[in-house]
Amino acid sequence: MEQKLPLPPFNFETATQKVKMAEDAWNTKDPEKVSLAYTIDTEWRNRDQFINGREEVKAFLKKKWEKELEYKLKKELWAFTNNRIAVRFEYEWRDTNGQWYRSYGNENWEFDENGFMKKRFASINDLKINEEDRRVL
């Protein structure tokens, strides 16, 4: 059976590693690559959307990064337990009209025994910013 290291149960080092791996993957803006960290039947809540399964994740991310241009993300470990991790994050992006945004949020993750994320619940808010106010570079 395929595994996505590190595996639960998490400690500070492995939880931090998992967060950094997620940050790096999302910053590629490659829906296929990002989707491989999730179970085939993953469940997401992202803002007001409910996404089920890896194929829906790929479609969601493709659409996201067509809208959110020059996307750059920073994640931070907030808490962890056996097979769960909580993170806070912020990312910046601009729309097709050139308006910049900083998006803030929290995510709760649950992993299966093979290290794949089976649940992701994200709460996110967007703030309009000026380009010169960017800080996630």
Image (spheres, rainbow, N blue to C red):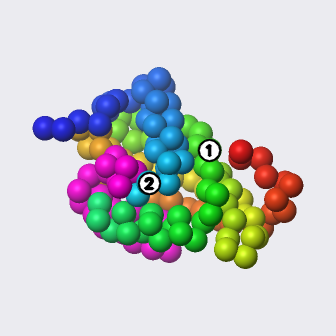
Q: Which SS class for mark 2?
A: loop
Amino acid carrying label 2: it is: Asp
Foreground pick, 37 / 32: 32
Horizontal placement of 84 versus 64: left or right?
left
Q: How many marks?
A: 2
Q: Please report whichever mark, 2 or 1, sits nearer to the chain's N-terminal start.
A: 2
Horizontal placement of 56 versus 60: left or right?
left
| Residue at left offset 29%, top offset 65% | 55
The magenta segment = 32-53
| Residue at left offset 40%, top offset 51% | 34
Residue 136 vs 80, above or below: the answer is below
Give residue 7's quadrant in the image: top left
| Residue at left offset 38%, top offset 69% | 59
| Residue at left offset 29%, top offset 60% | 54
Q: Residue 21, image x and y in percent?
A: 46, 37
Q: Residue 12, image x and y in percent?
A: 48, 25
Q: Which residue is mark 1?
A: 74
